[in-house]
Amino acid sequence: MVTHSKEFYVRTTVIVPMIEGNNGGWMACPELPDVLGEDTVRSCGDLRLIVETQGGVVAHLLRAIAQYTGFRLLVRDRRTGALAGSVEWVRNDAGVWVQWDEPVTACAYGQHRPTVLLAA
């Protein structure tokens, strides 16, 4: 496991597809707080765990809201706003939320310090 040179703080937000004439646009989820959570990251494992677990929490929170077909969980450095991780979930034909692909983190691309996190 690669550890970070120092701890940094991240904010988790959720975006959903825009409804009606959106041309593929996304917007903040109006049913959830602007900032879903704030966490401290001390290692790549911490960051991956945040992305993996928070996606499941959001799927649970949105289970009764049928208007959305998907959501993206974004984890950003609190100070710079740089994207540190993300994951996308979609609602299948049975109405169950499923993770679309593997979570992505800046660590997976060799970005291990807050100063070099992937740009948004």
Image (cartoon, rainbow, N blue to C red):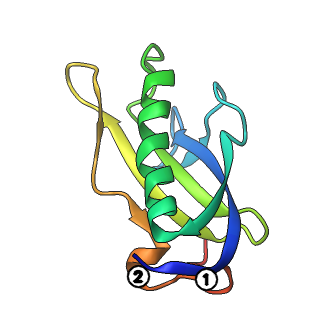
Q: Quadrant of the C terminus?
A: bottom right
Percent from the top left, x then y, of residue 74?
55, 54
The CA distance from mark 2 to mark 1 is 12 Å
Amino acid identity at mark 2: Tyr
Residue 113 location (% of width, % of height): 61, 82
Left or right, residue 55 beside residue 112: left
Residue 46, image x and y in percent? 51, 60
Q: Which residue is mark 1?
A: 113
Q: Is residue 71 visible?
A: no
Say what amino acid the circle numbered 1 marks: Arg
Residue 56 lies, in percent from the top left, at: 41, 35
Report the number of numbered marks: 2
Asked whether 10 or 74 is in front, the reply is: 10
> For mark 2, does the 10 Å Cα neighbourhood hold few (<14), some (14 to 19), or many (20 or more) residues?
few
Above or below, 22 relative to 68? below
Question: What residue is disc 2 on?
Answer: 109
For this view, does 22 lie left or right of residue 39?
Answer: left
Q: Quadrant of residue 2?
A: bottom left
Q: Residue at x 55, y 47 (%)?
A: 26
